[in-house]
Image (tube, rainbow, N blue to C red):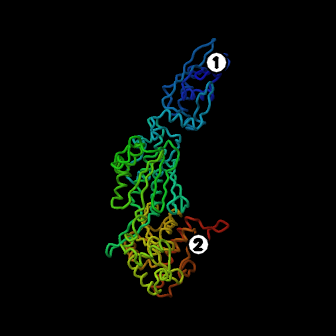
Amino acid sequence: MTEMQTFERKREYNQKAQNTMLAFLNTDGGTLYIGISDDGSVYGVEGNIDEIARSITNSFRDSVTPDPSGYFKVDHETREGRDIIVITMERGSSIPYCYASDGLTPKGVYVRVGSNTVMATHEHIRQMIKDSGTGQFLTELSVEQNLTFEYADKVFAEKDVYFGETQKQSLGLIRADGRYANLALILSDQCPYTTKAAIFEGQTKAKFKDRKEFTGSIFKQIEEVHSYLHVYNRTRGTFDGVYRVDHPDYPDIAIRESLINSYIHRDYYIEGSVLVSLFDDRLEFMSVGGVMPGVTHDLMRLGVSVTRNEKLAQVFYRLKIIEAFGTGIPRIFESYEKCSVVPEIPVIDGGFLIRIPNINHAMPKDAVNGKIANGSSEQQLLDTFSGVNFSKEDAAKILGLSVSGAYKLLQRMVGNGLLATRKEGKKWTYSDMQNQADYAIVESEYLAGKFVAFVGMFSGGATKLKDLVYAAGGAPTDTIPAFTNYIVIGERGQESQAYKNAKQMIDSGGHIELTESELRSICAGEIPAPAEKPIRSDNQMLSYALPEYERERKERQADVFHAKRAAFVQKYGVLQPDGSRDKKYWG
C-alpha cells in the first residue's frame, strides 16, 4: 500500500509524525501507522505499548489548540509479531487547528497536500478560517491571538462596564473554542485596520493641507479622528441683535454619526482603510463594502438598518456609543434640517460614502456676517479680502475712500464682529472672522479631557495654534502635569470677556497661563525663558530688601516658571553632551 492524502507510515513517533496528525486534523482526516517504515517494513515500537499510546494521546492533546479530543484515537495492534501504533484522525470542526506555542502562523498550522504534510501559508490559513466560518467576519477566528486590550479596558472602565473574560465571551470577543474572534482583533491594540484622514485645499484632492493615519483599537481611532476633525471644524459668527451666534462648519452630531457608521458598516473581509476627506465645501467618510442588499436610500433615512457587523453594533450599544440601531443616518439628516444644504449618500460600487456639506460655505455672506446689505462697502471688503489680511490703506484703495474714512469703517466692522484685527510690527491688519478665531473655551478628549482656553487673537489663527498642540501629542498638557487646566493668551486676551469667562470657569480646579510664544516654544521642543529671572544664591531668594509685594510677585513668577521647566525636563530629558543633567535647567 502506498502513502496517500489520508494514509501515512512513520518508523517512530517524532515531531514529523505529530505534524502529520495535525495535518490530518486540518484536512480530511486519515490514518497514521507508527512502527512501519515508508517502504512498508515492520519495525514495531519498543516498550510498554499502552504507555506509549497514552503518551502520544497526551502529547498531541496538550500541544494543539483548540482541544482536538474527540477527533483522534490512538490504538495498537500486532503485525509480524511486532507491536505497532495506529492513530485514526477525523477532520476537526474548529479548523484551523494549530500548535498552541506558535499560533495561527505557517509554523503552527499544517495541512495535507497529496501525500505530503506541509506548513500552511498565511493566505491558506485565512481561507481556512473563512471556509469554516459563517460569513460573519467578526465571529470568525482571529489569525492573531496575542491580543491586548489596554485602550478597550479604558473605554469600558469609563462607561462603568465590566470587561472580564466572562464579558468578552458574552459580547462575542471569545469564541466557544476559547480563542479570540475577529471582533476581539478590531477592538484590540493590535487592530490591523487603519483610518486615513486628509485635509485638502479647495474642493478637489489636488493639494494636501494636512494628512494623518490613525492606528490601534477601533475605539482609539474613533476618538482620535473625531478630535482631529474638531480642530478643523471652524466656527463663524452671526449676530442676533447684540448677541453673537456661533455656527460650526459641520454639526458635531453629523461628524460623530458619520464616523461611527464607517466602522459599523464596513466590510472587514476587505483590507483597506476608512477614508476621511475634508474639503472647503464638504466632509466625506468612505468605507469599503457597499450598502447591504435590499436597503435603499429612503429606507436608511427612515432608520431601517441591516447591520453587516451586528456584534460590533451590540458592543457600541452597550457602551452607549450609539443610542439605538438604525438611528445614525436619520440623526445626520436631522442635524441639517434648518440648513439650505443636506447630506448625501451617493451610490458607490463596493463602498459606502457619506458626504456632509459645510454649512458656512453654503451660507450667503450676508447671513454669515450679520445680514449686511448686498453691495455695501462692508460686503465689498469681505468679498475682496476673504481669507486674507489687509490694511486700512488696502481698504481705502478698494473703496475709493480716504484712509481715515476707511479706518472708521473698519473700526465699525470690528466692533460689529465682522472683522478681526491684530498688530503686525507697527502696522494694524484686518481679516474676516473665518481667518481668525477668538475661542472662549475649547475642551478636548484628545488632551486627556482637560480644559484649554485659547483667548485673544493669534498669529495665523487659533486653529493653527491648536494644530501645534495636537501635533505635539498633547503638549503642553502632558508637559505640565502639575496643573489641571491652562489658558493660552494671545493679543488683547486679558482684556477680553472670553478671558474672564475662561478664568472663572477653570479657576476652581487651578490653572496656569501661557503666552502664545511659550506654547509655541514648548511644542517646538524648547524651554521658554522666564520673563524676569530671579536672583538666587545657594537656592535662596536674594530679594528680601525689595518691597513685600515685589518680592511676592517675583517668587510667584519663579514658582510658575520652575514648575513649567521641571515638568518639561522630566518629559524631554534635557541633558548635557556627557549625559548628565543640565544644571542651568535643573537649578
Q: Is residue 10 above or below residue 149?
A: above
For the question of whether residue 190 can be seen, the reply is no
Which structural element holds mark 1? loop
Q: Which residue lies under the disc numbered 2?
A: 585
Instruction: State which quarter of the image contains the C terminus.
Output: bottom right
Instruction: Give the side of residue 457 with respect to residue 5, left or right.
Output: left
Q: Which residue lies under the disc numbered 1?
A: 2
| Label 2 crowd (10 A; few <14 / some 14-19 / many >=20) | some
Of residues 376 and 141, which is closer to you in this image? 376
Mark identifier at residue 337: none
Give the residue at x 57% y 15%: 77
| Image x and y of residue 139, in percent | 45, 39
For the question of whether residue 345 can be seen, the reply is yes
| Image x and y of residue 445, in percent | 44, 60
| Image x and y of residue 130, in percent | 50, 36
Q: Tag 2: residue type?
A: Tyr
Q: Is residue 282 above or below residue 26?
A: below
